[in-house]
Amino acid sequence: MADTHEAGPGMEIRRRPLTRPAVPPSPPVPESGLPADAPRQLHRGMTLVATISLFIGTRDAWTTAMDSHPAVAGVISVCYASILLCGVLSLLVRSRQALVRVDVLVLLTALTLVACGYVLDHAGADEGVLTAQAASEILRGHPVYGQPWPWLFDTPSVGVTKTMSGGADYTYGYPPLTALLAAPVHAVVHSTAAATLVTTGALAASSVLLWFLLPVPWRSAATAVCLGFGLLPHYAYSGYTAITALALLVPVVVRWPATGAGGRLGPGGVLRAACLGAACAAQQLAWFLLPFLLIGLYALRRGELGRRRGLAVTARYAATAALSWAAINAYFAVQQFSSWLHGTLLPLDQKAILHGQGVMGISYYFTAGSSRLDYYSYGSLLLLLALLAATLLFVRRLGPALTVLPWCAFYLATRSQDGYYMLMTPLWLAAVATVPAAAFATAWQPRLPRVTGHRAKGFLAAGLLAPAFVCVAIAAASPPPLRLSLAPHFTAHRSSAGVTAVRVHAVNTTGTTLTPHFADRVGQGASDWWTIAAGPAELAPHASADYLVEPPGGFLPMPADQRPRTYLIAVTGTPMTITTAPIPSPPQSVSPRD
């Protein structure tokens, strides 16, 4: 309403209406009461889980550092403060940008902890010392493959891979890329640290790369999987060449269904193919992912472009990867082709002693042995082929799990240690975050006219998998090849009772000539080979013989209560067999001297 003022008769002065100053409209407030740019709860959860994961193993590192590197312990203490701060901020910040900054702080804290861990532990395990020695040989122009280096394993902390034929592997049995990368470092750092520095750097690089390539809400999950849970850093400190392969596979796997879209690889596709070839030149685990990727890529591109163009783009991708792999291996192949080929294939045919958490444990830990251990290897190979066939037939269903499927085959192998699974888990995360199931909706699949409906497809899948599990059943159900009777020689030595020798009566129950080798086992690991002081090298079919075997060092301590229980194992390489028999407890009359 306008305000008026009477100035005189017949005259009226009007004033302008009273108005309030303009106020900008407030942004809409969601019903939850949070700002419109508030981070999603999934993002908060990922950040918080990554923050909590940094606690794992940090106390042990701090305790070790206080004894030997107090300055490192001080840095770890600061990291504790950072972890607590990140935990608070991940729950309190109210914008997405602020939570991204918290993600950056979590990543930097994790990288700092990994650096501290490297300072405390960089001596390396068997792969690390072999890679460092290979780097040294490269610098001097000497052959790398086929050269035994037994002195590298004189340190008790460096284990050696024993073979079922009674020997051990002292040669370099990995593709050359990690050794090539370690060579210039070894020129400055003349120790195993040259190799472990490369693998630790590769882990840090792969973590940062995956962090940037993943969608924003998933980034802290990369920090947790790569650095936070304490799994992969210890493999990096040990010098595992698979860490180098992992770093190269990260750009290959992230959003891999987009590779070759439209029938053109482009710079991104060429780079991915080159990284795939380089990963195959770094460690054999990458070989198992390769055929799955090629099958998935062909199915996607054929569904989009047709058979001819889909095959062409897949062939260009494979050829680029092969060229990258060949360029890295060329020098070594030309230098000594036979030794190079044997060295790169060594893990596949070396017949290493049983080890791991897979089904082979039935014959190694829970029964008296098996005369058909080779069937575990057959089952592993058949499972790999079955999974490849299933991926081809049902790629629309199995495509999202393509980065997990290759490692399932190792569960049936005679070497089924968990490292084969854990080392590639960042690729699992990359798949779930960047490879949605919808990407395979139009992928090509072979037509199966008589296979319709979920039940029929289930029967087909079961048929593909059945041969592998039949092989496992044969290996697990087969009886041990030897019947062993043990007569230990006990003695008291200093503060403990133990065995100085075991007289073994062995009966070959099979129709094959066997060459047994003996070791003892407490829990999951086998000792060095025992010395056969008396007895034949070969045991004829259905024959029996007496052996006198002596433990490494001439004495095996054995507590009277036998907890844990000590076993004597007899293994053969061709065919692969194992027989296990418990060593009797020492009698009470054998007591240690004060």
Image (cartoon, helix red, strand yellow):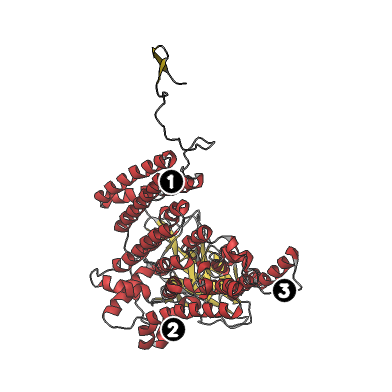
Q: Residue furthest front?
A: 10
Give the label on residue 341, or none. 2
| Residue 380 visible, this angle | no
Given the image, on which type of amino acid does mark 1 rest? Arg
Question: Which residue lies at the image location 36% right of the left edge and 83% below the top edge?
Answer: 332
Quadrant location of residue 298?
bottom right
Disc 3 marks which residue? Answer: 448
Given the image, on which type of amino acid does mark 3 rest? Leu
* Mark 3 or 1, nearer chain start: 1
Q: Is residue 95 above or below residue 320?
A: above
550 sits left or right of 507 in the view: left
| Residue 2 visible, this angle | yes
Residue 112 percent across, percent down from the top left: 32, 53
62 sits left or right of 573 in the view: left
Disc 1 marks which residue? Answer: 96
Residue 310 percent across, percent down from the top left: 57, 77
Crowding at dot 1, Cα within 10 Å, few <14 / some 14-19 / many 20+, comes out as some
Quadrant location of residue 181?
bottom left
Residue 81 percent across, percent down from the top left: 33, 42
Measured in 3D between alpha carbons, the distance from the residue under mark 3 to the one under mark 1, in whole angstroms, is 48 Å
